[in-house]
Amino acid sequence: MPKENVFSPASGLSRRLVLKTGAAVAAVAGAQGLAIPAFAAGFPERNISVIVPTREGGGADRNLRAFTAIWKKYLDTNFEPGFYPGASGRVGYEVYMGKFEADAYSLIFGNMGPEVLNWVVKEPNFSIDDYIYWGRVDTDPGCLFVGAESNMKTIDDVIAEGKKRKLNVGTSRLAHPASIGMLALADKAGIEVNLIPLSGGKRTVAGAVTGEVDLSVLTSGTVAAAGDAVRTLLVFNDENVLGEALDNAPTMNQHFGTDLPPMLSSRAFGIHKAAVDNHPDRFEVLQSSFRKVFEDPDYKAGVLKAKGHWEYVNYGGVEECAAFKQSMLELGAQYKSYLTGK
């Protein structure tokens, strides 16, 4: 539905009147040689579409809803999520890049870790430079976990069992930082594993809980949200910052003396590069309003209500996202043989 043509309930002034007045002021200022700051007049004038390349109800969905519930206070619009799961996230990106206009009225909200790794495994049908990530919401390390009823109580139990037979390991998608962590662990410990993509966080947790797989690897925020149904045995990060929420599990580097880089997932908003180039004023409005969310105490309350972990929430802009994207491309190239079998 179109936005109500109202500037503010208190003033009763219409948006049209305000824009006309602004134009008049600009004309006077221009005639007098005064500098006029550039701004995106009226942006946004309609709702903003957000493409999510995973299923509704997953970790990205929870993060998105918690964030946009506050963001709309500062951007004065509504967000319309559309979920396009499939092909390890590829479908959502292909829909976004192929069917949505580059006008800053559509965004993609993705998990930079696995979704950039996906491009290493198989190039997309568009240039990965044709979109940029610009608004990071969190960084979430991967972890290894079992169902609460599993006979494997520690990571050493996992290794001992792996010495006897090949272990079936669930993962949300093959090209995932947590998958790399698992394969690097198997290589270090001299065991064999069979990675089984279970398509999404909920199914990956369920695979471990029901015993469909021996164990699973996933982003740790989703695992912590599963509570007592699972038991975390290893974290692929420099530190287990959630502590008890992840069963005080050791990190891989601590326990095995390795130097594996953190296997991070990171949810972030992306946008067409052409939208940034052609509508820099709109992009600035998106950026400035985005930053305000992190300072709003209601955002923290929303994250906690959604069973999220504030320890993982951290702002990142264009530069931080670009650095993360590049690090994932390099990590994917380093471990490509693990992910493709080649």
Image: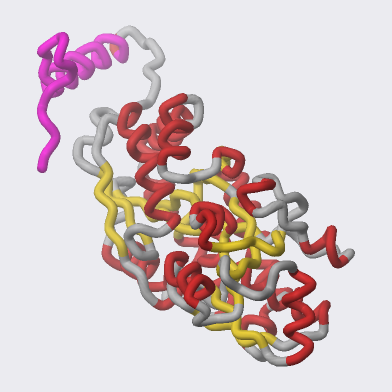
Q: Which percent across, then down, holds residue 189?
A: 82, 79
Q: Which percent across, then down, holds residue 273?
A: 44, 53
The vertical placement of 226 against 94, above or below, is: above
Is residue 14 highlighted in magenta?
A: yes
Q: Quadrant of residue 3?
A: top left
Q: Residue at x 35, y 58 (%)?
A: 57
Q: Residue at x 37, y 75 (%)?
A: 86
Q: In the image as oriented, which residue stretches furthest toward the right?
A: 257
The vertical placement of 28 against 286, above or below, is: above
Of 104 and 315, the residue lying toward us: 315
**Side of 304 where 31 appears, left or right:** left
Is residue 340 highlighted in magenta?
A: no
Q: Which percent across, then down, holds residue 206?
A: 46, 71
Of 57 and 208, the residue lying toward us: 208
Inspect this view and state whether residue 266 appears: no
Q: Residue at x 71, y 63 (%)?
A: 234
Magenta span of residues: 1-30
The vertical placement of 285 against 6, above or below, is: below
Quarter of the image that includes the N terminus = top left
The vertical placement of 316 against 321, above or below, is: above
Q: Quadrant of residue 154?
A: bottom right
